[in-house]
Image (cartoon, coloured by chain):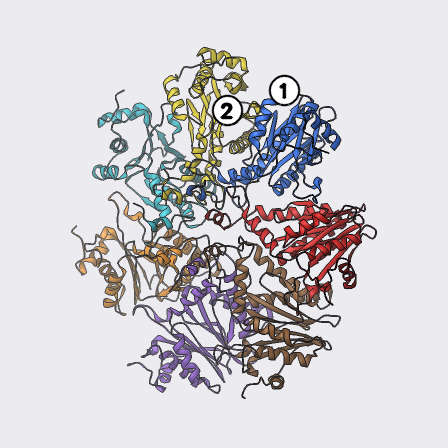
Chain colours: A blue, B yellow, C red, D cyan, E brown, F orange, G purple
């Protein structure tokens, strides 16, 4: 599956292959596929982020497997891929949000944040002495003007805006489900159900304890994590709840 | 297609091959061919930039796939190739434009900007520890003296001025079309049609939503993005509109 | 067991393999497996850390084979793997704890400490010129609010919280034992016995002199090392004591 | 054509081969041969530089393919080879000329300039982390004392003075023509004709639009670019004009 | 004896092998085995260090083959392995001892010194651009509180405390002898005899001139080098003296 | 002619081969052999330097092929090998001569200068990131006390003093001629003839225009370049003149 | 003679081989064997250094082939191996001697100087970016207290004190002769004869002009170079004089 030429391009630093690809960046994408999936859904009155915590052992404290992270009052992030790398990007995003408040005395826009983060990622693909980040982020939030926004970052450092997206393992299946089911007029409640149903495509019995859901609504402009019961009732809507 | 010698020149840094080529620069050109096409056309009363947004998924917000970028009031840029690299060059170009206003209290000339950008690109081909940019730019604008100008930058860091040009995938076909159809006395309206018709050479049914067009005219000296209807009516002129 | 491709990814610096793995980090995990085991158990009224000192020679002073380290009044750490690397992380953790006291005039939280340490570890996996740490830590302590906490760090720089965990050699056997035997309502005394019984899975006759046990209880918030007799009486509970 | 030994010397930095050659410098010379030719002719009353612009497409603005560059009032330069590298050397030469005026309040001598440029080139062949310049320059001008001078620089950083020379592609043919036809008593008009006739050796029908000619005469000490008609009338002298 | 994989891990810098070993550190241990042996013995009233000077030529001044080094009034060090590396560690240890006196106005503890030295050694195993130290040290001394202490450092940077130990060549034989013969109630005189008898295991006829012995006793807290006659009389106790 | 082992030692930086040689330095010596020859002769009343200018083309200005260089009033240098490297050493030598005048208010001694230059050369053979100089110099001059001196530098950075020497191509033949013909009681005129006759050993018909001769005599302490006629008359003495 | 493994350890920097050797250091020792021999002899009333100048050509000024160097009034050095490297160490030694006078207002001890030099040498074996010195030194002198001393440095950076030693080519033969003939009660005159007789072991007819001898006696504490006649009369004592 890997030929001789490919080998030549992954030593030392991120450089171009004869067909114009950056292998280190593409290998970093593979690191993302190795993780569990997260889903982001933009709705008319807010943004939903949902993530599947794949617990290695019953002794792990599930809440320490952070897949959803609060960046600021009004922005949350779902991460997929190399966990330690994700933590660095989360920290970087938090700093940027804080800097914005200090400098301009107002919350950072979702797109502005996505661009700061992707600039930082890109620098790790062009200079020697560092490797790319093996992490994708789904950045969801509500802009100061009340618009819900959802962005995704990848290891190349490109920011795209999405109506709904999925990062991490099993992307093809989940994205195809999202493309079929997403409607632009979804409200937040519908968005939560869609996000969970999408996750359920790769993990049939979803344990409400093993799922994280965060929302930012256009009314409060605040990140809120859903309680297990709330998740459970959404799971019930499509028959995705576990046997508890 | 790739022989042993070639392999030897793409490790570590950008160095000369025995036949005097810089392979990393040539591989970066391949990255450009992998992208979608953009077209630039200089007319008697302004410059036109048009780009085809190849949308990976219906869920992507098309406007977040930026192919056309406003650099300053009077200059826009179309990019092709590695998207994250393009964003760095765009940021660099914006800074240069701003610096010019601060230092000389006047808008930067199009050629001056193209040269600043290509100097920056060239430095990424001669020093160790960095790789070239996998990006081409078409820089269009109106000079302070009212002259419309169109420049192109490539990964080697060479600035050329064009009457009309195309960057990105499918270049041979599109350039050959442009060479046949371009006339020096085109006005802005004719230029818009030509730019769209050129794009249509590689993508038969052009969705007006999936096309971006920006113009800078010699009267206002300002970048203006065309609305979908305006694009649509130009598409109609050569039968290139989609089925909506 | 090791193929050609793998070889290509372990030279020079930590970079991604085509399947998205960081081999240097995975090799560092092997260094951890080569060491003796340590166990951490969180109980209702404190945290237990226990370690097996594999003494190379009867002439070594056992207490100089440090497996358990006091980081601050209220936090202790068990280490496994490359001993010299562990000492660097211990020193780093102590500095962080001290800095927290100086800066905020209060003891550092267990999770906050775990995150400082893993950030430091992660930086050793992304920049050139350094190698990852071949060390895992189990960080146990009582938070200023009285909550007992147990975290684990690995060479990738990921912090996970555990109810009970084991680091070092023989992990599969010991973890499976822990998963079977751990109950959330264990008190400190029960936790000590469980920790020792877990260690005994890989080392049948446990010499009370060769075992270190430290506890941090929710009453005193202080690290305390158990005396040999105390360890001995716990060993007696499950028949794990040696023949002395 | 390239043997194993050769491969060993072109990686990383510019070092000696067993037969005492610097391959990176020799490969850079190949980059020069890949370009179009430029000609320099020193005459009794001035220096002539002429260059052939090989236009890739009729849509390129010919004047943006700079082969001749004004360095200062009294010095012009013709370049051949890697265009982006040439631009860096041109910029460097302009700075040196300006520095001379600021420091000594007089125009820089042609030889002094050639030496500054070649020192700069040589440094790119002896230190690691950079590659040589893939560019040759013909530097022509009139010294403050009224002497016309013509120098050439190569990628090794050696400055030679010439009565007449050619850089770029097809050197053997053109130089042999120059050696046959050059006479020391040529005046400027004769020099222009000889320069064009030399260019014509490699490009039979010379389009006056596609040729650049600059002269520096001993009377005005100023660089002057010839108009197309002037070039045309010189082409007529040896039957080298195109069919317009 | 050395397979392909191993080769891959010893180039450039100290990195992990697939089985979690640091080959450069292990190779440095081999450098230690190539040297002559030194022995350290802790007794009830002091510490003994003894070393065998393997003289290459009768013309070498034996006392210039330093195997035992005074670090401070109360601490001595025996070294084994790469001599030039040992000298650097000795110098570093002396500086640390001096710094301690300047900063705290009291002699440095033996363990504190061992840890400073091993931290310094560890840094030479984790950062690029340096190689590990090919040297082991036995650090013996009397703490300010009167406790005799004996530590050993290795190329990984791990400090262990010993009752008695041996560094350098022939370790297995010598350590096994020490393990058999060492008793915790040895006094200084008995310790000297044991140290010499241990050395004699690898070098049957010990020339008292070729042996160095240093002691630090708990009464004077001072390093003292034994005279040849004193050594001779100890050798006589077990029949290890030469034929003089 | 070049075996596998040799290949291994010429990559990256100047390091020792198993037989204790510095290949990069030896390859740099090959660069010297590729050039034309220069000759230095010390006589009772001055030093002679003579060089053969191998003109690539009749259009090159011969005097721009500098083989002899004035360093200070009383010292001249002949160079052989890589021309661009020689220029750097010449510049360095001139600076040293100037520094000596500024610092001590007197001309630099010939030996002192040779040592400054060779120290500079040696540093280019021991540190990474640079390559050796592919150049030999013959440094001739008259010391402030009136003694004529002749030194030679090589790429290793060793200064030797000579009565007469030759650098550059054909060394064996020329040196053997010098060894046969040199007499210690030669005066300056005889030295000039000997130098030219030596050059003639490798280039039968010597064109007086193509030969450079510089002398420093003990009376004036000044470098003087010989005119063509003066060279011609010396050539006549041994029948070495050309056919003009 | 050189196997595959060995090749792997001599690239880039000085690192350990699997058997614990530093190949670059051992290769540097080979550089020393390639040179001519020098001899050092310590006597009751001073130290003798003698060296054989192997003259490449009768035209070389023998005194410029420096094998013996005055470091300070009371210390001289003989060098062997790579000449340009030796010169750097000599310069370093002179600076250290000067620094000692400035700082402590007294001459540097011979051992102190040997240690400064070997520390400097060792640093060139442990850090990247430099290679070891291919040079051995015999450092002879008289300490301020009147004791004659003789030290030797090698490429690893180890200082040993000798009664008599030889560095450079043919060491085995010469050292064996020295070991047979050296007596501790030799006076300076006897030492000179022994040194010359030792040199004669590898070079049958010793030309008094081709031999350098320096002595430092305990009376004057000053380095003195012997005149040819003085050398000649010593040669006569054992029949080692040439045919003059």
Secondary structure of the residue carrying tag 2 is loop
Res. A186 image quadrant: top right
For the N terminus of chain B, the quadrant is: top left
The residue under the point 65% across, 47% down is C118
Q: Position of residue A109 (x, y in %)?
A: 66, 28
**Residue A42, percent across and down?**
65, 25
Q: Residue furthest bottom?
A: E244
Q: In the rendered image, which residue does mark 1 sit on? A: A184
Q: Is residue E68 visible?
A: no
Element class at badge 1: loop
Q: Front-most of D64 and D227? A: D64
Q: Which residue is mark 2?
A: B54
Q: Position of residue C127 (x, y in %)?
A: 56, 47
Q: Is residue F84 something one can see in this rendering?
A: yes
From the viewer's perspective, is residue G118 above or below residue D21?
Answer: below
Which chain is mark 1 on? Answer: A
Residue F118 quadrant? bottom left
Residue placed most toward the observer, G161 or B99: G161
């Amino acid at each position: 599956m890997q030929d001789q030429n490919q080998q030549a391009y992954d030593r030392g630093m991120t450089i171009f292959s004869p067909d114009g690809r950056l292998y280190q960046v593409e290998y970093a994408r593979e690191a993302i596929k190795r993780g569990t999936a997260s889903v982001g859904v933009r709705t008319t009155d807010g943004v939903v982020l949902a993530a599947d915590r794949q617990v290695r052992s019953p002794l792990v404290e599930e809440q320490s497997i952070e897949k959803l992270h609060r960046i600021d009052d009004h922005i949350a992030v779902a991460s997929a891929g190399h966990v330690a790398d994700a933590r660095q990007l989360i920290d970087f995003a938090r700093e940027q949000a804080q800097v914005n408040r200090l400098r301009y005395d107002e919350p950072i826009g979702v797109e502005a944040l996505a661009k700061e983060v992707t600039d930082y990622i890109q620098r790790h693909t062009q200079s020697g002495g560092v490797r790319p980040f093996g992490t994708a982020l789904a950045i969801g939030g509500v802009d100061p003007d009340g618009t819900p926004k959802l962005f995704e970052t990848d290891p190349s450092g490109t920011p795209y805006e999405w109506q709904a997206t999925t990062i991490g393992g099993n992307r093809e299946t989940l994205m195809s489900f999202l493309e079929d089911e997403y409607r632009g007029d979804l409200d937040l409640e519908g968005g939560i159900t869609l996000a969970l149903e999408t996750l359920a495509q790769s993990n049939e019995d979803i344990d409400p304890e093993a799922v994280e859901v965060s929302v930012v609504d256009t009314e409060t402009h605040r990140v809120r994590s859903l309680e297990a019961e709330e998740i459970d009732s959404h799971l019930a809507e499509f028959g995705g709840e576990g046997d508890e």
